Amino acid sequence: MRRTPETGPRATSTPVRIAIAALAVAILAPPSIAQDPGDGRSAGLSPEAREFWDSDLSSRLGDWIDGRMESTPSGERPEWLLMFADILQGRQLDAADGWFSRPTGGTRYGWDWTRERFDGDGDGVVAAREWTGPAEDFGLVDADGDRVLTGADFEWPEHALAGGPGVALYYLADADANGKVTRAEFLQLFDRLDGGGIGFLSRDELKGAFDPGTMNRLMMAGGIKGGGPPPNPNGPSKSTLVRGLFSQEIGSLWPGPGVDEPAPDFTLPSVDGDRDVTLSSYQERTGKPVVLIFGNFTCGPFRSQAGNVEKLYRRYRDRVGFLLVYVREAHPTDGWHMFDNFRQGYNLDQPTTFGRRVEVAQQCRATLDLDIPMLVDAIDDPVGTLYSGMPARLYLIDRDGRVAFKSGRGPFGFKPEELEQAIALMQSSEASTAPGNGDEGMEVEGPGPQG
Ligand SMILES: [Ca+2]
Ligand SMILES: [Ca+2]
Ligand SMILES: [Ca+2]
């Protein structure tokens, strides 16, 4: 097991760190509590700070940062600065905005790696007969299902929240919004669509179920389950988002380790408090690669992934270790309060003590009905920060403690299928690097990097 000692967030220059720290101090202190009926109960900002961040002045600051970044090579533009500029300019922070606007993950097992390994006849595609990994894994790697592997299988062009009829069906059926559609929920959806109680659904009833108006009516039929003031109907104010950025609710300000870099070691308590888990010792003991899943309860997209990650866990837990690291809330009522959380009753303030975070994590595990072993990050977010795990993210760590796969930042980059492809390719590499086949392999024993 090779490890490089880690002392804190890396890959960010000192001046940038100082700038972040200075901004964070200016924005977050003093923590005066002022009422902002439009933005949850409190954005935790002084009225003066809020006035500034919500003003046109901050838009001009955003324009100025944008202008400065245009002359900076794209690889040198810090993620947090992209996010900051887009917030100040009033963008909606969707998949094309801020730090979501560029891929920040990656995999060791991309198309070049795959072609080099399996394309025996050199025709630029990998046919099923050329595949030497476990036969059942070929279909997992063949993302577009055309029975050959090409570069297209590694592109994953759709972001994780992209819609479609299946997604609409999922949101209609998952009445308690816990990421899993049970048999009972599926039958309840039948009853909800069969408004007249006739006992069958017609083609047009099913067709109409996915009309936006009908969907909205069906989703609202359960009423509002959350208490307290509703979220701002116009979306979060800029001041709320600025505060959320620098308190790391919207996501960690640090980039996290890249592919092939050492996975920072950490020790965190389990959600039950019955043991501490150290990543390196866990790997040494189990001898397995490890999937790290970062997530939190108030991130609706993360909840919607609960069934996906749980199925992945059940499929691979014999061969791969899984640890879920519970991190800072993305959408607390005192931050970027979301209407869907309000409607579904997932209403809570950002925990300010570790004990409270553990309570929320336990509630999350119970509601999402997760079997994946869960750890809870400390209240000042050391592990979420090191891995850029907020609001949600996936990693695959190889047996040597290096990052083999890193998803894009959640919610848009959180794609369990992409992780599964990396797991399948890692397994194929292990199957074909058995002793005596002469392959140089990825997991050669030897002296690690000297710290
Ligand atoms: Ca071929
Ligand atoms: Ca294919
Ligand atoms: Ca459900």
Image (spheres, rainbow, N blue to C red):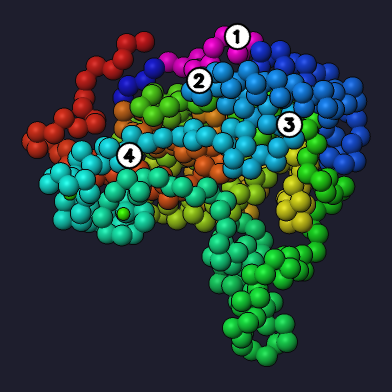
Mark 2 packing: few (<14 Cα in 10 Å), some, or many (20+)? few
Q: Measure the alpha-carbon separation of dots 2 and 4.
A: 24 Å
Residue 256: image location, x then y, percent: 50, 26
Position of residue 283 in the picture relative to residue 41 (left or right): left
Q: Measure the alpha-carbon separation of dots 2 and 1.
A: 17 Å
Mark 1 and mark 3 lie on one chain; the one further toward the N terminus is: 1
> Residue 179's image quarter?
bottom right
> Residue 110's image quarter?
top left
Mark 4 and mark 3 lie on one chain; the one further toward the N terminus is: 3
Mark 2 and mark 1 lie on one chain; the one further toward the N terminus is: 1
Identify the residue position indicated by label 1 in the image. 15
Residue 110: give its label.
Answer: 4
Question: Contact, CB < 8 Å: mark 1 with mark 4?
Answer: no
Q: For mark 2, give the secondary structure.
A: loop
When the figure is inspected, residue 19 is found, relative to residue 428, above or below; the finding is above
The type of residue carrying mark 2 is Pro
The type of residue carrying mark 1 is Pro
**Front disc: 4 or 3:** 3
- Asked whether the viewer can see residue 375, the reply is no
Identify the residue position indicated by label 3 in the image. 89
Q: Measure the alpha-carbon separation of dots 1 and 3.
A: 24 Å
The type of residue carrying mark 3 is Gln
